[in-house]
Image (tube, grey):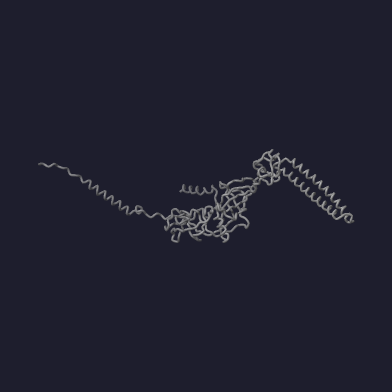
Amino acid sequence: MMRAIVPARPRVLPVLRVMFLLSVLSACGKQEQDPKAQGAAPPVPEVGVTAVQPRDVAVENEYAGRTAGFREVEVRARVTGILQKRTYLEGQRVKAGDVLFQIDPAPFAVALARAQARLQDGEAQLRQAERDWARVSALYGENAISARERDTSQSNLDLARANLAGAKADVEAARIDLGYTRVEAPVSGVTSLEVRSEGSLVGPGAADSLLTRITQLDPLYVNFSYPDADALRQRALLASGKLTMAGEERLAAELRFGDGSVYGHEGYISFTDSTIDPATGTVRARAVFPNREASLLPGQFVRIVPKGLTRKGVIVIPQAAVMQGPQGTFVYLVGEDDKAKIQPVTTGSTLQSEWLIEEGLKPGDRVIVDGVIKVRPGSPVKVAAPAAGNAPSAPVQPESEREQPLRSAGAREATA
């Protein structure tokens, strides 16, 4: 029998397998030789460092405050009568002594006239008693009358003198009451809305005496409070000499508005309470500011910055250098081996963009202040050159002079 002829299989597939294996081995060899493929060590991070040194710093804490009138006076009626007239405009500025209201003066003018008549009667009785005493004393010297008659004449003279003194007091009281019909401003300031209108019956009682209020705006008070911790710390620092106060009598004060702008006039702290409010845990204080232009009004919310307190020989670092961890606040220091290490610190108050360090740092410590996010404890770091902002500033050149070197360089390149 004849066998079927089977064609021979080509030997292409084995050859392809050999080529694939060779290519895989070649790629593995390249990976072994390429350090990037193995994952080379990351570059050493570059950081900004500052060597801390003690210095004197001004302590300027900011507290919330509210303005209030220097004086807020209630204008009240002091006699009973009909309110005839109001002589000012509501909300108008008035000066001390200006007439604000007029109460009907007629009844008080009559009372004054009656008192003056009694005064004249008392003067007449005194003159008569003095004449009687002159005659009686002469007769008594001649033994023409008894001692009893002399004593009676003496008593009449004393009584006339007493009646005259009472009549003079009545005249003065009636004159005062008549003067009270002209209600005057006790202080200079701005008036409020009237409480009682013309035609009302007013009197010295608590319910019907209030007529208006006057608020003195120049100067102006700013009431504020600060935490008891600040008060106790300041007392301890002042006692130890670590905190000094400029001026022995009072501290200056700066007023800032909500938008951050600063009031144009400096004030001073006029009052600090000697007790701590148990409800809020704060100490009440008050500052006084001039307000000649009436740019401040009572009831405004402002910020108060006491000035004149100075911490002596303290260490301050930028706030960006202070980190917060599970064990508290810390900073990164650059050691002598140029490796970063953690240093726990105790922070004090903030000074604008800096922290005051109470404990944890000593003079000469190199604190990482820039690039902190790239630092790992115990890892090496590279200290960068001081930034342009920390180096001495060069004179600013005009724009035309700054552009000239660029144009000259471009010209040289074109020539080349």
* Number of disc labels: 0
Position of 62 compared to 71: left or right?
left
Across and down, in percent, residue 33 comes to 33, 54
The quadrant in which the N terminus is found is top left
Query: Residue at coordinates 62% horizontally, 55% vertically from top-left?
Result: 250
Across and down, in percent, residue 295 comes to 62, 45
Query: Residue at coordinates 72% horizontally, 44% vertically from top-left?
Result: 180
**Residue farthest to the top?**
199
Across and down, in percent, residue 401 comes to 54, 49
Query: Residue at coordinates 55% horizontally, 51% vertically from top-left?
Result: 396
Q: Is residue 3 visible?
A: yes
Position of 318 compared to 77: left or right?
left
Q: 95 or 184, which is in the foreground? A: 184
Across and down, in percent, residue 235 comes to 57, 58
Position of 129 compared to 35: left or right?
right
Q: 226 or 318, which is in the foreground? A: 226
Q: Quadrant of residue 92?
A: top right
Q: Quadrant of residue 372?
A: bottom left
Q: Is residue 102 visible?
A: no
Position of 135 compared to 82: left or right?
right
